[in-house]
Image (spheres, rainbow, N blue to C red):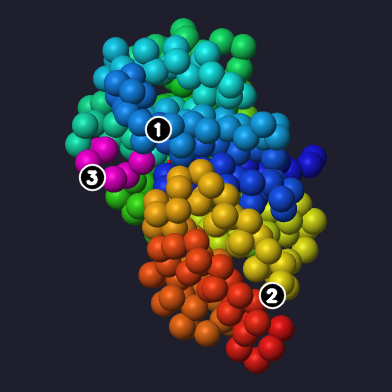
């Protein structure tokens, strides 16, 4: 059976320019970063860019975070009216301020299950004509039963697909992925399960697919500064971009950010992206340091010119 690869929602990253970079390397299925239900309902302008979809984007899901029933209801209605191919509900965010609400991964705590299922029912009633999915974490590393029971309930409530990040919320993004838990859930529910966690190469993807039995896999941090991960995953062989290729994709990505956010904000947000593209590829550290100070288009152009000429240490 063929594999399907998804670009994960990544807050602060997976905006339109980021997705375009990944699409240029063959990625197809992707999600916006999480949208906060309250911010959407109350018209917070920060959401504007998260929600922006490119005309050429042929498949894009949107992800909702929240747990206040009224906000969840209204925001689900709004997202259903917008141009997205799926609506996903976030039950995985481990940030302290989100857990406190309680939202994100806090909905997996037994004390909050009733609220979690209430939110799922509310969204289910409002999302029509497109899949409604959930992205969550495992509930227990050693015992798959709590995660199975939770997922079965989601399916009873009408959830059409589940992505499982195989780590506990308390582990944030570190440590091994509990592949066996994902495997058993996949065997236990009737909807597609997407496995997520720790894919940084084709080898990692093969190992995760093998261990979980999932042919749907989601890539998150492995795409940071490396949209070519999709080329590698789709072709099945390792791929490292050449120097000029890297410069071209990086340039397009950052120029896209400047166009979308304006010069000042675009470059502020672009610093960490530029650093991510350069890390581990043999470039002199001075470029990563300089990237951290870029604030005008002119500085960026000079930076790219120097990078193009100098290339990685030891030659192209
Ligand atoms: C910077 C960052 C932002 C993230 N933002 C989101 C988000 O908006 N929604 C979500 O469901 N998960 C989010 N995640 C979690 C990832 O989608 C993914 O589940 C997690 O990183 C594990 O996959 P990985 O090991 O391939 O990175 C975020 C992760 C990181 C590192």
How many other residues sit within 10 Å of disc 3, few (<14), some (14-19) or many (≥20)? few
Among the two numbered marks 1 and 3 on one chain, the one whose residue lies closer to the N terminus: 1
Among the two numbered marks 2 and 1 on one chain, the one whose residue lies closer to the N terminus: 1
- Residue 38 shown left or right of residue 130 in the figure: left
In the image as oriented, which residue stretches furthest toward the left? 100
Tell me: residue 120, above or below residue 174.
Answer: above
Percent of width and height locating residue 216: 65, 40
SS category of the residue bearing label 3: helix
Quadrant where the N terminus sits is top right
Membership of 58 in magenta stretch: no
Q: How far apart are the two marked residues, 1 and 3, measured between alpha carbons?
A: 21 Å
Which of the pair 278/156 is nearer the observer?
A: 278
Membership of 94 in magenta stretch: yes
Which of the pair 235/18 is nearer the observer?
A: 18
Residue in the picture at 68% in, 64% down: 248
Res 161 → quadrant: top right
Question: Residue beneath label 1, please?
Answer: 47
- Could one spot residue 196 in this view of the protein? no
Question: Residue beneath label 3, please?
Answer: 96
Percent of width and height locating residue 169: 34, 46
Question: Residue beneath label 2, please?
Answer: 243
For the residue with label 3, is its CB less than 8 Å from the closest atom of ligand 1?
A: no
Res 144 → quadrant: top left
Percent of width and height locating residue 54: 62, 35
């Amino acid at each position: 059976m063929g594999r399907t690869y998804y670009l994960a929602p990544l807050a602060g990253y997976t905006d339109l320019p980021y997705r375009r970079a990944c699409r240029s390397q063959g990625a197809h299925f992707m999600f916006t970063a999480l949208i906060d239900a309250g911010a959407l309902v109350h018209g917070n302008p920060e959401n504007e860019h998260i929600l922006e979809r490119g005309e050429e984007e042929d498949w894009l899901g949107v992800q909702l975070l929240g747990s206040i029933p009224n906000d969840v209801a209204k925001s689900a209605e709004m997202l259903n009216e917008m141009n997205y191919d799926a609506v996903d509900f976030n039950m995985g965010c481990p940030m302290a301020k989100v857990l406190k609400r309680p939202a994100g991964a806090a909905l997996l705590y037994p004390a909050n299950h009733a609220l979690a299922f209430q939110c799922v029912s509310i969204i289910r009633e409002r999302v029509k004509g497109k899949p409604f999915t959930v992205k969550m974490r495992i509930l227990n590393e050693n015992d798959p039963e709590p995660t199975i029971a939770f997922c079965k309930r989601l399916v009873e409530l009408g959830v059409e697909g589940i992505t499982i990040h195989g780590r506990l919320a308390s582990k944030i993004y570190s440590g091994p992925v509990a592949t066996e838990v994902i495997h058993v859930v996949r065997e236990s529910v009737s909807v597609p399960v997407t496995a997520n966690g720790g894919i940084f190469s084709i080898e990692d993807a093969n190992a995760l697919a093998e261990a979980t039995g999932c042919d749907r896999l989601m890539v998150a941090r492995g795409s940071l500064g490396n949209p070519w991960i999709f080329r590698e995953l789709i072709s099945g062989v390792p791929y490292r971009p050449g120097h000029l290729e890297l410069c071209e994709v990086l340039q397009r990505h950052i120029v896209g950010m400047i166009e979308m956010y304006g010069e000042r904000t675009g470059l502020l947000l672009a610093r960490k992206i530029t650093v991510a593209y350069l890390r581990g590829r043999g470039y002199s550290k001075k470029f990563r340091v300089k990237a951290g100070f870029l604030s005008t288009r002119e500085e960026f152009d000079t930076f790219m010119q120097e990078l193009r000429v100098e290339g990685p240490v030891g030659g192209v």
